[in-house]
Image: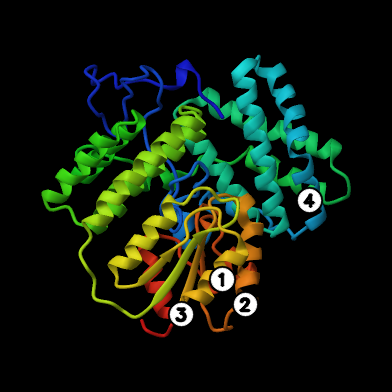
Amino acid sequence: MTGGSDSISRSRSDPAGDFAPGQVCRPSRPGATRPGRDGPASFPGIAETPCDRAAVASASTGRPSNGPHALYEPIAPDEFTAAALETGARSLAGIAAATLAEEDGLSGADLTRWQGFLARTALDLAASIRFGSARSFHGMAGWQLAAVGDAPAEVARLRRAFRALAAVVGERLPGPGHLGAVRLLTEAATLEPVPATRAAIALDPRDATDRLALELLQAVLEGDRRTATQHMERALDAGLSVRDAYLRVIGPALVEIGRLWHAGDVSIAEEHLCTEAMRTVLAVVSYRAPVARPRSITAVTAAVAENAHDVGIRIVSDLLELDGFKVIPLGADVPATEVARAAILFEADCVLISAALLCHLTAVRNTVSVVRASTPSTLPIIVGGGAFSSDPDLAQRLGADAVAVRAEDATAVVLRLLGRA
C-alpha cells in the first residue's frame, strides 16, 4: 500500500544490524523494511495474513479503541450499497487513485499499489455496510494508520486516500445508501492510529521470546526455512513450551509480516514466502508437541471459501490438539458444502471457521447457513479471525454460536458451548 525508500531503515543505534527494540533488519534488501510490530490479534488472536488487523483492546472488549471515535453512530445493513461497492470496487479505486496521484505525484508502482489498496478498502467497506458494522471498518482503518504510524507523510497520504475514495463514492454510487459509505470513509480519515496495538504487542529484544520472534522473522523474510526451524528447535530444546512457541513467538512474528505487507514494505511474493516458511516451522513445533490426554471431542476447522490464509486456523487446530481434541483440519479456501460434509463424516462435536478479511464475511454467513442446514442444530459453530477482531458481535449476526477472539480462547469457548467447562 505504502512504502518507499524513506519508510524503511536499519537501526541507527545498531549499525551492525542487530535488533533494536521492535525492529527487524533485512540484510538481503538494505533499506527495505519498516521496524516494529503493530498488527492485530487474529483468528483467534493470531495475525498470519495481510489483513489480520484490529486492536488488541477492541478485540478483548468488543468496543472500538479510538477514544472519541467510539461514539460514531452505527450503520444499518444495506445489501444494495454493498453490492454496488463490490461491483465497482476497481473502477472506484482507479478514479480515487488518480486524484491521489495528482495531489501526491504518484506514478508507476506506487500508483498501482495505491489502486490495489483502495480497491481492497472498497471491498472492506462493502462488507461492513452489508452486515451493519461500522466498528469493523473503523478497526480496519485504525490499524492501517497504525501500520504506517512511524511515517507521518504516509499517515497523511492514507488520510487523503480515504477522503479521495469518499468523494468518488459520493459522486458515483447510486441510491441514498452511499451516504453511509461516504460517512464511514470520512470518519476513517479522522481516526487516530490504534494506540492499543502498539502498546500491547510491540516486540522487545530484551525479552527472550520476543527476541526469538525477531530472529524467526528475520529468517523467514530471507526465505531461510532451515535457519528458522533451527532457531525454533534450539528454543524448544532449551525449555520453551510448545504452547509458548505458538502464542509468544510464531504468532507475534506473523503479526509483523502482515503489518509489513500493509505498510508496503514487503511484496505479495515475499509475504507468501514468509507464510510458506512459517508452515515449515509449524510442522516442527507440531511434531514436538506432547501427547495430550484425549477429551473425546472432535473439532472440524477450516478457513472459509476464498480465504487463502490458513496459518492462523492451523495454529488454533494445533492448540486444540494440545488440549486433547481430535482435530480435522481442512485448511484454506474450503467451500461451505465441504465443511458441512466433513462435520457429518467425522461426526464433529464442533466446527471452527476463520475469516481473515472483512470481504470474507459473506462466505462465513454462507458456511454457517450450510452447516446449520446439514447438521444437528446443537452443533456449536465458532468463528474467528481478523474479520471479527474489531466487532465480535458480528459472529451472532452471521448465525454463529460464538467468537474466539484469541487462539488461546478457542478451547474454553468450545468447552463452554458443549457444557463441559
**Which one is nearer the viewer's eye here, 133 or 228?**
228
Q: At 63% from the left edge and 42% from the top edge, which residue is drawn?
A: 188
Give the alpha-carbon distance from disc 3 to disc 4, as whole Å.
34 Å
Q: Is residue 143 above or below residue 415?
A: above
Disc on res. 417:
3
- Closer to the observer: label 4 or label 2? 2
Q: Which amino acid does label 4 sit on?
A: Ala
Give the alpha-carbon distance from disc 4 to disc 1, as whole Å.
29 Å
Work out whether residue 344 can be spotted. Answer: yes
Q: Do the residues labelled 2 and 1 touch (CB within 8 Å)?
A: yes
N-terminal label among 4 and 1: 4
Residue, disc 1: 341
Q: Position of residue 101 (x, y in %)?
A: 69, 19
Disc on res. 83:
4
N-terminal label among 4 and 2: 4
Disc on res. 203:
none
Is 78 placed left or right of 51 in the picture? right
Q: At 31% from the left edge and 25% from the top edge, which residue is drawn?
A: 25
Work out whether residue 71 can be spotted. Answer: no
Q: Are marks 3 and 4 in contact (CB under 8 Å)?
A: no
Residue, disc 2: 374
Q: At 32% from the left edge and 36% from the top edge, which residue is drawn?
A: 217
Q: Where is residue 69 in the image (x, y as percent from the top left)?
A: 59, 49
Give the quadrant of residue 316.
bottom left
